[in-house]
Image (spheres, coloured by chain):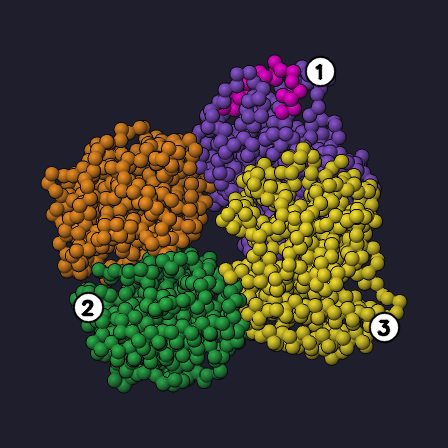
Chain colours: A yellow, B green, C orange, D purple
């Protein structure tokens, strides 16, 4: 968020980026009806229409309101309707009732988007303010976060429909094998963790600081659906030995016996729900839609089986590995729209994890596909300060009882992820594209 | 449900009735967007789209499937999607998730309605079956019930929106006074209760039987919003003396301090939400949207104040009064569309209770406006038998832990109500147009 | 509660009765440790110590406080601690926390009992007040009610202990057959229901009034454990056809598959918990510890099986039968302590239902053994008025969402029951000695 | 848990220690009745009798069963009754129903204690096994943990009684001032965290490892009741700015407006419940019975007020400070029974935090008084392995969604605490003696 040497060039590049990000949100909703955009299937999820409006509200509230000359709100009521959780902004509409907001209509929200977007572009064109630049950049990353949530919330919604409808036209699932599980040593020691000053980062990624990382090895690929089958077949969901105490309570209380969206097909095999409809489970694809409890239980079960100190990595270990020259960086393999690259991001439009084909150059591929649960609880880095004002509520106030996930997923825009990026969810959450990459002590 | 003397004439009259009823459902949805028809604001309520589809499912399942030659379902999946609670028909989609059914779209449901409707009309034209006649008649009354639910569910939905939108264009609230509370003696003794054989009735209205009704007097008008103000001002919601034990627990647990939809306006007065938006409370209109607990508490409070044995009537007492020649029957004052008659039904399009202007002929007006909570729990009449098969689940299985309401409301079609009609809801329910007409021992 | 012709003789007889009732409470606790008297196993149940104190509180508050000259409370704090639900008396200790009242100790409560008891006796000796007579009589019946609750609450408590301890020394379960199910016609018509003026009754038993009872037949014996076995074996708990809608929800939510206290013994048979410990189910004994939902489901199942309109009786039907000269009245067969008579009451110390051996005189035996669920919801009789003041909270405020039970049980003192007696519990309650006596339309 | 050079001397010293620890448990229960020992006031707490039995069960199950020749259980049923959470041992009695175990009686449990104790002493006298030594040592520390829980559970139980009874005879609360808040710099850098090999430690305290600690300062004393008063007076419980998002939800849902046990006295001041009964809040004593959410909110509020980066310390920061030569170690100031020392432990019998009088030698006093909430979630140290078998369930399976507390409290035995000791509780827990010691960035 530091001032740029040539503000106007920076602002112009930012205008382009802003336009592309905004357009990507609309592209995601293209296959959807007003009704699809209206519904909310659980309190944790939001309607698509709400996402479209809230991301616009963010620009209106944090960029236009303080910086636009003669600012007038599009509609004063939207201040309450589309505030997510910013107490500093005032009242909010209750989250579980977002699906009850049938007015304003989708068409009105699209009009709201267009007007605010044009006003932001105008401001960007006329302003050289570093604050404006920083806030628009933040708003773009905020909107990209919501693009991922639009996909996960929509997936949950469609999964509740007995028709099991598909969002995207049937996409030919890549039939490919995956590498056997292997282990990469990672350089450890006293190491720098967190984001430096190269480009954008959320406040929770800093300050960069020294942390001690002890030697370990990291798995060459995520745990797959096939691996998980073996865990289930071995009674993994019925054996308290593998589970954290709170996890075991959760399994019992919720009668959990498989990952979210799995269903027994009645002939001894499993199917799962995807954004392409219900499909047979493909053993070669990375496991997805599991809770932290399940990820941890799987690691304990495998450790007992293999008699090795296998476990989830800490977020520092993961970041160490992701910064290594042996790691393929996300933007090195920037995907074209509709093309499936090893780094499987939203742009591939697979919206489902793909098998990780072993690379001839032996590089690790940690980004995309599925978020990796880490054993680190979400906590502030040493010296962390939240930003002043309401925008400071973005991250800091969630730093308790959540676990960090790293690396992005098949629903994450490729330009949104980086080695220092910290995602976080409660330990029982499963509707994100969350998976497992194992670590092991040496 | 008895055979008719001239089946074809009866079938032809029924076809007309069927068309009008079906049309009335569509007319109710005319001001609504696909999004308005999609949303569900609580588990007790259903989306408008679901109501439109379920009432059609009823005709398809109970009329066409057994009686149409070469029956083919419109879409086999709808059997599960639009089944409300008939275990005899098989699986059902979970009620709280009806709002998640974004597919089929509203347009598809309208197509479903049209096709099934045409097939029913064709069947009616060609069949002389008494069973078909009886089932189509039942289906029409079933659909009229859902017309009322569409209005109550929609009202609840719109009330959750901070914009407090209105469903109907602003309707000039009738400024009229109301009569002071007075008491009508009702002829009592051993009397016939329940529906005889003149026209349609639900199974729960019979068999007609003798019951002993002890002498009592009935109020000349419902309790009004103004009466209720006095109850609140006297601390009625904070004094356990007036409340049933379970009612007091409910008041405490839910922090109830006024009828549903009331809100203090910040200047010592109350507003309420209507299908015309939020309006000031009019003291002359009948109180509405109260639970059985509140109705009963009000009666106890007034009894203590007036030192008279005031209470809620039993359903038998109410029916006695409603059969009296001193009672204006609902169809005697059949309303024209958009016209407000003393018997305030859905056709008046007020969708809100209106002041009961005293009549010069001294007749009681028990029908329309607000449902009257009675002190009778919903139970089978002596000799009651549910119909055979799944259609027998219509009423009987709800006969526990509910109270009977009588008389219809401003959301009830006028041709749907009669003296023997028994509505029923749990004691905490408030989103129906439920009110109070008091009785008193003599 | 009417004045007596010779107060002092009546007061003297009452003193004896009072002493016997108080002594009976102590006799029930004789086998118990201070710890047994302390614990509370669920919010619906109370500790034995609390029952001992609360019944004393009732005499102190309603008899001594208004009528004793120079009244001083035993301990002012007890007013709050041992108030059950009388808002008119002021604050109450929260019901689910009664088990947390380790102070006062049992010994202190026994001292409290003794002092209050002596003061009541002194008052009875010196007063000729009809009000005192009526209130002491009420207090005795109140204490007898709590004697039954002491047994049911204790049974629930002991059942929670994996040791499955027994309260009473092993009692030789009577091995006897039972009569096959048969039906007794009952004289019906316009009949008097409710308590007249012969002796004590609770306010809810009056006023006596005329009610219309339609012809029916009543079963010659309660449903037995053996009958219930057949219902379970036929899948009765898994078939929604037999269940009220709310009952089916309850079965699913609570995973109910047998009466309370039943447990499969692992070899295809059932055991049940009794106050004599865990024993095999005896098919000849009346079924007990079932909810209203289960009673109703059983009746529907049997009706379908036998193709007869079998159902639960109304409370009026039951009372009609209980007043008949063909019915053995409870006090006709007054049991001696420890002796098992056909009318199986608390005095028999069986504390478990016994087989009903057919009588040679063909008389019905409706009292004792198990309470009979009726299809009548608990409601006021025509003209019912609660007593003035706090004592008026005794019954009236519970008249909603409960069903009436009739006839008493093996835990009811024989002198406590009568034909007009109305017990009441919510439809899911099972820890009382509740069973079924069927009726059938003719 | 390593072998000792001279086993028999070590075993003899351990026998003495074992006897003292066992005796201390009995001493705590001396003022209590069988009823006090029976009751359970919430699912998180256990009855005193259960604690007495469970600590004995631990020795019987983990020491005697594998190591005593010809082992016979005292009572096989106790294996289930008194198992807390060890799945490896088999079934357990449900935790919320521990208060229902009226059998065995307290006297039986005391007999159980004595017999098992004698058998352990005999085993210690005859065995030279290092495993026995390690397990008895573990059992002693386990029992000391339960001594603290006995006090906190008892305090909660007594607080539920409207009589507000006291456990200990009235203890003259020390009237003393406290130092103004000041800050001690702590030596930071790469430092060793965790327990080395000097004496006993739980498995979760190791392995010792290098961690990076960044420079900070630590408060010279805990936050006091007086400090907290200012937070409340400033509206701290009503302002979402100070609260973690989940904490704010908790405050709203539970209507929290003060620490546990506080009650407004009606004249503008606060009282609190102690083991000596209800007393006025003493502003000089350390604040206690607050949740993590409250501790964190207080720090944020003070940071905003003082415009300094004040916050909770991490557990590594706390341990750094506690290992410093400037810190008074717990056993340096070993308290005599009944004497109040600066290190306020269970032996002082204050059972309440005491003002920290500034020391002339300027040493920090981090041990005793109140547990310090840290900002560290409870997680395994690098290389952590749980012990083999059921005893390995002791700690590891709780490592999620809990925060670490450090330093011991006025209810902790002095010989039980050390610099590496990690206590842990969920973020809403308040019934422990939990308080706050603040840190600040430099």
| Extreme residue in the right direction | A5
Which mark, by number, is residue B192? Answer: 2
CA–CA distance in space, label 1 to label 2: 99 Å
Which mark, by number, is residue D6? Answer: 1
> Residue sitting at 58 percent across and 75 percent down?
A105
Q: Mark 1 and mark 2 in contact? Answer it, CB < 8 Å.
A: no
Q: Mark 2 and mark 3 in contact? Answer it, CB < 8 Å.
A: no
Where is residue C71 drawn, in percent x and y? Answer: 34, 46
Query: Which residue is identified by label 3?
Result: A8
> Which quarter of the rendered picture does the C terminus of chain B lie within?
bottom left
* Residue range of the region highlighted in magenta in the rendering: D111-135
Taking the image as shown, residue C361 lies to the left or right of residue A383, namely left
Q: Considering only vertical position in the picture, is A291 above or below A121?
A: above
From the image, state whether disc 2 or disc 3 is nearer to you.
3
Callout 2 and callout 3 share a chain: no
- Find numbered disc 1 in the image and state the secondary structure of the residue it sits on: loop
Q: Looking at the image, how many numbered discs can be counted on the residues?
A: 3
């Amino acid at each position: 968020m530091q001032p740029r040497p040539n503000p106007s060039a920076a602002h112009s590049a930012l205008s382009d980026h802003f336009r592309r990000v905004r357009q990507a949100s609309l592209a995601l909703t293209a296959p959807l009806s007003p009704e699809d955009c209206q519904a909310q299937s659980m309190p944790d999820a939001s309607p698509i229409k709400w996402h479209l409006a809230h991301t616009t509200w963010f620009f209106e509230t944090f960029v236009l309101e303080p910086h636009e000359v003669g600012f007038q709100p599009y509609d004063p009521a939207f201040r309450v309707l589309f505030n997510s959780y910013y107490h500093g902004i005032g009242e909010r509409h209750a989250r579980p009732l977002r699906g009850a907001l049938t007015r304003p209509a989708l068409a009105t929200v699209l009009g709201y988007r267009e007007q605010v977007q044009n006003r932001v572009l105008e401001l960007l064109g006329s302003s050289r303010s570093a604050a404006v630049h920083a806030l628009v950049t933040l708003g773009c990353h905020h909107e990209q976060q919501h693009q991922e949530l639009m996909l996960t919330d929509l997936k949950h919604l469609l999964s509740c429909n007995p028709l099991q409808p598909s969002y995207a036209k049937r996409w030919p699932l890549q039939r490919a094998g995956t590498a056997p599980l292997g282990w990469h040593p990672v350089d450890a020691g006293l190491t720098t963790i967190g984001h430096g000053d190269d480009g954008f980062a959320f406040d929770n990624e800093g300050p960069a600081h020294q942390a001690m990382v002890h030697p370990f090895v990291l798995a060459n690929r995520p745990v797959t659906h096939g691996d998980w089958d073996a865990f289930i077949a071995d009674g993994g969901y019925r054996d308290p030995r593998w589970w954290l105490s709170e996890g075991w309570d959760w399994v019992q209380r919720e009668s959990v016996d498989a990952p979210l969206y799995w269903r027994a097909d009645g002939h001894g095999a499993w199917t799962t729900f995807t954004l392409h409809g219900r499909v047979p489970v493909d053993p070669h694809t990375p496991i997805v839609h599991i809770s932290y409890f399940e990820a941890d239980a799987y690691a304990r079960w495998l450790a007992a089986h293999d008699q090795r100190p296998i476990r989830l990595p800490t977020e520092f270990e993961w970041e160490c590995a992701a910064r290594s020259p042996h790691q393929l960086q996300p933007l090195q393999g920037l995907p074209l729209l509709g093309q499936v690259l090893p780094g499987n991001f939203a742009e591939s439009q697979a919206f489902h994890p793909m098998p990780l084909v072993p690379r001839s150059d032996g590089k690790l591929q940690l980004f995309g596909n599925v978020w990796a649960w880490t054993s680190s609880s979400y906590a502030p880095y040493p010296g962390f300060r939240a930003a002043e004002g309401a925008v400071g509520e973005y991250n800091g106030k969630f730093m308790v009882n959540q676990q960090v996930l790293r690396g992005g997923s098949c629903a994450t825009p490729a330009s949104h992820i980086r080695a220092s990026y910290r995602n976080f969810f409660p330990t029982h959450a499963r509707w994100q594209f969350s998976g497992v990459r194992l670590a092991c002590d040496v």
